[in-house]
Amino acid sequence: MKFSLFYFDGNGLNPQDNPYRLLIESAKYADQNGFSAVWTPERHFHAFGGLYPNPAMTSAALAMVTEKIQLRAGSVVLPLHHPVRVAEDWAVVDQLSGGRVAIAFASGWTMDEFILSRDPHGSRKTVMWQGIRAVQKLWQGQAVTFTDATGRQVDAKTLPKPKQPQLPIWVTCQSMETFIEAGRLGANVLTSLLGETLDQVAPKIQRYRESLTKYGHDAQSRTVSMMMHTFLGSDSEQVKEDIRQPFCDYLKTHYGLLENLAKGMDLNVSLSDFSEDDLDSLLLFGVEGFMKGRSLIGTPESCQPFIQKLHQAGVNEIACLIDFVQDFDAVMCALPYLNQLRKLTAEPQSMVTA
């Protein structure tokens, strides 16, 4: 099992002094301690993730302070961008980093984001798949034909040339259809347990592996990255107590996430129907739900059995979302425990006995 660090909260509404300090310092730690990658997202128009509108910019910054770790977009919402700009921007970061970039592509989330797109929200999946193929060709130095505003066709080749001859690609997947299509493409996948259980996601991972094989790709060489909220310490009960309120505050910044979680527990709820007191109770319920089978919260030893279940389901990398706790010192102090878990799960015998 590989481990990477994932950033997704980054409240941009009221940024404190040096709001990117956690990103920079935790990335340095991951770089120095054998983690596989760091992921920064693309988010628009919401406090939730508001520090991260452009993963190319954050990855360029990280390229200057790291040496070995892969720098990934998690994700580039491709329908919001022209493929030429994606290829150009990330080729720059690839050169700055010495060939360490990778991109997880996504089709988009909210309607508001699509003020940045020339295409309607309803066609986002088709646009994403077409855009991925265009970015791949441009990355490899091939010309791709595009049409300008007058209808004139232009054969475009992008510069600068990237360091890597092939761009490592992930696809952000939730639906079965997307998993299967990612397998057809031969891409890696990024997924989560935000709205589903591991038992519900496992069949999708299996179909993805089958799709890889069906379309001539090496299924064993591809990575299934599972994004998980992660916070570890020396005592499980103390860890849960310490993160309970920060986790509630985190969920308050994105009520839609909590509604999806409730639906994943077979609860049909609308948060607008709740009083403040009821909402606080529901938030606590949501946190408990996350802690049971949807996150890595506890000690390195207590998390090992769940890592084994993820491994058996076909997951081979944990993308550890760490910035839902908005406390720099607390998160940094938790990273050595995560590194301990990384080392434990790298030992085959510990996975068997967990």
Image (tube, helix red, strand yellow):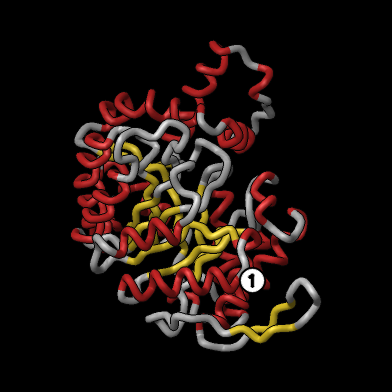
Task: Determine whether 331 is above or below 170 in the image.
Answer: above
Q: Nearer the viewer, residue 255 or 63?
A: 63
Question: Which residue lies at the image location 30% right of the left edge and 75% below the top edge?
Answer: 98
Residue closest to the far right: 151
Residue at 52% over, 55% down: 191
Instruction: Say which of 54 and 203 sits in front.
Output: 54
Position of residue 232 in the picture relative to residue 249 (left or right): left
The quadrant where residue 96 appears: bottom left
Number of marks in picture: 1
Question: What SS does tag 1 mark?
Answer: helix
Residue 353 in view of the camera? no
Q: Is residue 163 above or below residue 334?
A: below
Position of 303 relative to 329 (above/below): below
- Vertical position of residue 284 compared to residue 8: above or below: above
- 113 left or right of 226? right
User: Which residue is tagged 1?
Assistant: 131
Which residue is more in the foreground, 86 or 125? 86
Mark 1 belongs to which amino acid? Gly
Which residue is found at the position 55% from the left and 69% from the top?
A: 85
* Quadrant of image for the N terminus: bottom left
Observer able to see residue 79 = yes
Q: Name the residue: 53% across, 48% down.
A: 43
Give residue 25's position: percent from left, percent from top.
Answer: 24, 49
Left or right of 153? Residue 16 is left
Q: Between residue 101 and residue 213, name the one nearer to us.
A: 101
- Residue furthest front as drawn: 150
Q: Quadrant of residue 275?
A: top right
Residue 328: x and y in percent read 26, 37
Give x and y (percent) for residue 265. 59, 34
Q: Position of residue 196 (x, y in %)?
A: 57, 44
Few, some or many residues within 10 Å of mark 1 (<14, 14–19, 20+)? many
